[in-house]
Each structure stands twice: as structure tokens, then as C-alpha cells.
Image: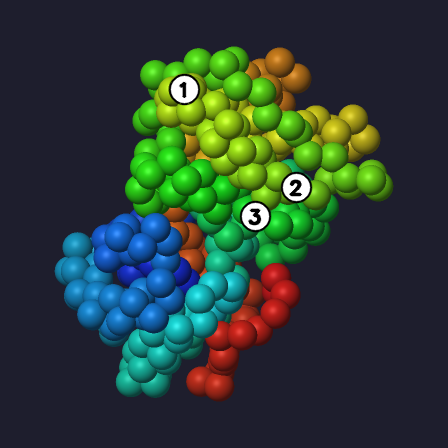
Amino acid sequence: MIVFGIETSCDDTSFAVVENGVKILSNIISSQEIHKEYGGVVPELASREHIRNILYVYERGISEAGVSLKDADGIAVTNRPGLIVSLLVGLNFAKGLAFGSGKPFVGVNHTLAHVYSNHLSETPPEFPYVCLILSGGHTILGNVRSYTDMEIIGQTRDDAIGEAFDKVSKFLGLGYPGGPVIEKLAKDGDPDKTTFPIPRFKEPSLDFSYSGLKTAVLNFYRTNPGIKKEDLAAGFQKTAVKILLNNLSSYLEIHNTKRIAVTGGVSANNYLRTEFRRFCDERNLSLFLPEKKLCTDNAAMIAGLGTRLLESGKSSGLSLDAVSRGLN
């Protein structure tokens, strides 16, 4: 079964061809450089760049995969969540392909697709398992029961972890996106030169908060002008990951879970991957991490999950919108 995938939820334009939900025949990603000068994604500019790039990634993707539209058994496209003006570009392109070819198409939830990226490997996790979805828009701890069934047991109440990386980077004048820049800078820093608070809620909760950490880093930087940016970056990164591990540890105190998965753009961070491996090794837990190229937004995960949806008989009509709510 060959499924085309289209992803335009934020600032990456991506097209992929996936066979049987696991074999990636092509996965083309066009990243937008235009947002760097603004320190963050500008939705209208993102939408215009998607319009410029969508045909290019499609044509390159089918060429690299050695297929044509007639070979497709279906088309999968992100239709939520994301920037509406960006989602509409990919959604309408997918509708055009489906209408012109008569192929079935299905809308895919971007969050669940990130979870599915762990299944684009030779050793995917067995259900059920616990998954952390970490990106600029999401910090979610979920209990994954199937490809389309995830119970959210904790999520951010304010800034997502990736958003915090971006904002701290902007404060320090390091550029956008913040994740790779801070990770690189932190390699030469001492994380113990700074101490930042771990957020606490009044009631028992597995939710996350990164707004306070972001503010603490800013205040420390302003009141300690002699601090090295390398040390500040290292301290911030260490605390950001510690928040995740603390919540995961609290969950494991109550629930007997043996399989942990981490996904989303922030899961490409080497420090994070090292700390999660150490954490899981100490507790004899199985850890699942996607290849780094599958951590960030990409169409292969959309096509993969889309395959499972189409196999189960699900499809979308041409009236599908980009503002549907919920995971399913």
C-alpha cells in the first residue's frame, strides 16, 4: 500500500511517499529561513512560503520514490493542529490531488503523527506505552493505546518546551530556532553555574510549565551580567530536561510502565537523548526515540499514520476543514 503524505502545519513544507506504513520511499522537507530575522514563525509569511514550495516538494518526492499519482493508494494530509493559514495550503493541495485522481484521502492529527514516528523503525514500541511529545507547540505526556488512541495525562499549561528554547535564545540574542543554537552553546558551558526553579502546582498534577523557567533565565541574565552565555544555556537545558524526567518519574511511581517513547522536534536534542537513556537504563525501561530526521515536522509520519487510518476504512470528504478539534 503506497500512501502520499503532506505536512504544512507550521514552517516546514514536506511531502513523503511511504509503503505499507513503514518503508519510506521519499521524505522531502523544505525548511523556511525567512523567519530567522523575526525570531519566530510569522504565520502569513509561512503560508506564502508553503504556496511557493508545495509543488516543488511534491514533484521531487514522487521522482525520488519512483512513483506517480496513479500508483498511490491514498493521500494523507495534516489538518490539525497547527497554523490555520499553513494547514490550508497542504489541505487544499491534498484535496486537489484526491479530486483529480479519484484517490481516497484522509486528514491526520499532527500530534498523533509525531507519536507514529516511533513506528517508522525496525523495532517499534508495542502498545501500550507512554510517550512524551516535545516541540515548539506541544509538551504532552500521553498513554498510547493504539495508533489513534492516546490518553493525555499531562500537558503544558503555558509555554511548550520548544517554545521556551526559542524564547530563551531570543533573550540571549542567539537566533532562531533556539533549540539547536542553545544545545551547541551548552556543550561549552557548566550547568551547575546556575540554579533555576522546578515548577510546582498547588494540586497534584503531571502537567508541565515552562513559562516560569523562561522568566527565571531572563531575570538571572539581567541581574548577573558577568555570567557566560554558555553556562546559562547549559543550566537552562539541564532544568528543562529535568522537568520532563521529574514528571515521568512521578508517573512511574504509580503506573507499572516498561516502554517509554519520546518524539517531536525537541527529542533531537543530544543532551535530552542522553539523559533519557540514562534514566531508562537505571530503571530497566525500554526507550524508543525516532531517527533525528523524523523528530521534526515531516510528511513521512503523516503518510505512515494515514496508512493505518486508510487500512481501517477511514477517509475524509472534500469538506474536511483545518479547525477540527480533538485527537481522533
Query: From the viewer's perspective, is 182 left or right of 310?
Result: left
Going from N to C along the chain, the mark reached first, 2 or 1, is: 2
**Amino acid type shown at disc 1:** Gly
Q: Which residue is drawn at 47% across and 31% down?
A: 222
Q: Nearer the viewer, mark 3 or mark 1?
A: 1
User: Which of these two is toward me, 175 or 319?
Assistant: 175
Residue depicted at x 49% and y 75%: 322
Q: Which amino acid does label 2 sit on?
A: Phe
Q: Element at badge 3?
A: loop
Q: In which quarter of the image is the N terminus?
A: bottom left
Image coords of residue 233 (percent x, y): 43, 26
Disc nearest the viewer among 2 and 1:
1
> Which label is found at residue 226?
1
Give, as a three-letter code, the residue at label 3.
Asp
Q: Name the residue under label 2.
A: 208
For residue 19, above or below residue 284 = below
